[in-house]
Amino acid sequence: MYSSKSINRRSFLISMGGLTVSQLLIGCANNQQAQINIQLLKGSIPAQVADQFRKNLEKQVPVKFAPIAQIQESFKQLQTWQQPPDKQDTGWGRFIPFRQSQAPQLANFMTLGDYWLKTAIEQQLIQPLEPTKFKHWSNLDARWQQLVTRNDQGFPDPQGKVWAAPYRWGGTVIVYNQEKFRELGWTPQDWSDLWRKELRSQFSLLNEPREVIGLVLKKLGLSYNTADLKTVPQLESELKTLNQQVKFYGSTTYLEPLIIGDTWLAVGWSSDIVPILNRYPQLRMVVPRSGTAIWSDLWVSPKGATQNDFSAKWIDFCWDSKIVEQISLQTKSNSPIVSNLKSDNVQAAFASLLLNSQEVFAKSEFLLPLSAETNQQYEQLFTQMKA
């Protein structure tokens, strides 16, 4: 799907903040096995929202919320669950002769990033959902429905099955030091600003072919998901000029140089940037006017997991208008369900992301899976650019 060398917010980056284990292990102590088991990315669901779900159930069904620190951890868990019991590492089973293997307790739903969806489908790690069970499914914009409707190879397909339920999203953004730009008399607003001579050797870019080549394509009025880069004759010259401007490429340590003043600006993921803005008031985040790349956190159901009426309520709960607002404001991320947030409820540092969410969404794109041949084009051009 994408390069195995890539390190990005959908794999190794830790989502900051969120719930403690004591807050999340919610349920009935007298039941050994939870009837609803939700495994979620730390910081993506507020603790009070999880607690409210339990209280709102029509019956006292035991519920367990288990936090994970990284999206990659979810993907590895999915792989482990699909291994034969005798190959699953229990850490101590070898010392118990004649011990019978037990089937693992699967989560009813767990967080997975859209980046990993194609591979999870291909490897048969997850099972399709039944959207007819979700009363709010019809409230999703068609683009969200298309994102999670895929064939058995993991490619978007209107005739495919629904494999996931999106519950929050963010994007690739620009974060900059206001003090540095005050001296210049202007502030970054769009990708084209990265080519301005004042910024030469003053900013960093993500070390990701799809992200870097994609923002150049967007600058040229084209799609992040362009299938044949050879049809864009000016692309190589634009990339060459951009490479002369950038100070370094990094996907995991790009914020530290910005904080200490070694760079003035960085291109990064909102999930990394949002948690630090309150601590560093000199930093400001902006969503490029021409649109950007969108990432989404999804609920998926592991293959073999139980899907009952109670577990289905979790999806609808996350799509309820009141809960949507809580998730958006407290995790400072957008919801796939349209919500009319009030400006007085949103801090200025996050206004460009939250208050303009529908405008941003309309101009932006998901990084959809591409063919192996197209992926190779992106990899080769990116390598050539940096060389």
Image: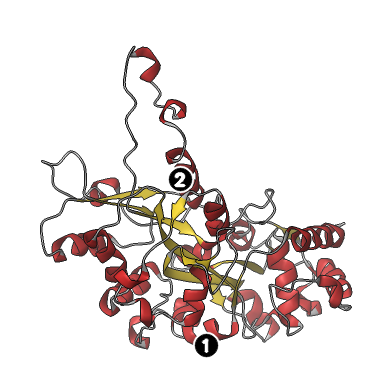
Q: What residue type is labelled 1?
A: Glu
At x 87%, y 78%, the residue is 234
191 vs 126, nearest the viewer: 126
- What residue is shown with label 1? 359
114 vs 66, nearest the viewer: 114
Query: Is residue 190 rendered to the left or right of residue 142?
Result: right
Pointers 2 and 1 in contact (CB under 8 A)? no
Give the quarter of the image for residue 171.
Answer: bottom right
At label 1, counting other C-alpha atoms closer than 10 Å, the crowd grade (few under 14, some 14-19, many 20 or more) is: few
Residue 282, visible in the rendered structure: no
- What residue is shown with label 2? 78
Residue 333, visible in the rendered structure: yes
Quadrant where the image shows the N terminus = bottom right
Query: Is residue 120 rendered to the left or right of residue 252?
Result: left
Number of marks in the image?
2
Q: What residue type is labelled 2?
A: Leu
Residue 263 place in picture, x, y as percent: 68, 64
At x 84%, y 77%, the residue is 232
Query: Is residue 128 rendered to the left or right of residue 49?
Result: right
Query: Against 302, is 333 above or below?
Result: below
At x 83%, y 57%, the residue is 383
Which structural element holds mark 2? helix
Residue 93 place in picture, x, y as percent: 37, 20
Distance in Å between CA atoms under marks 2 and 1? 35 Å
Residue 68 place in picture, x, y as percent: 40, 48
248 vs 105, nearest the viewer: 105
Residue 338 place in picture, x, y as percent: 39, 83
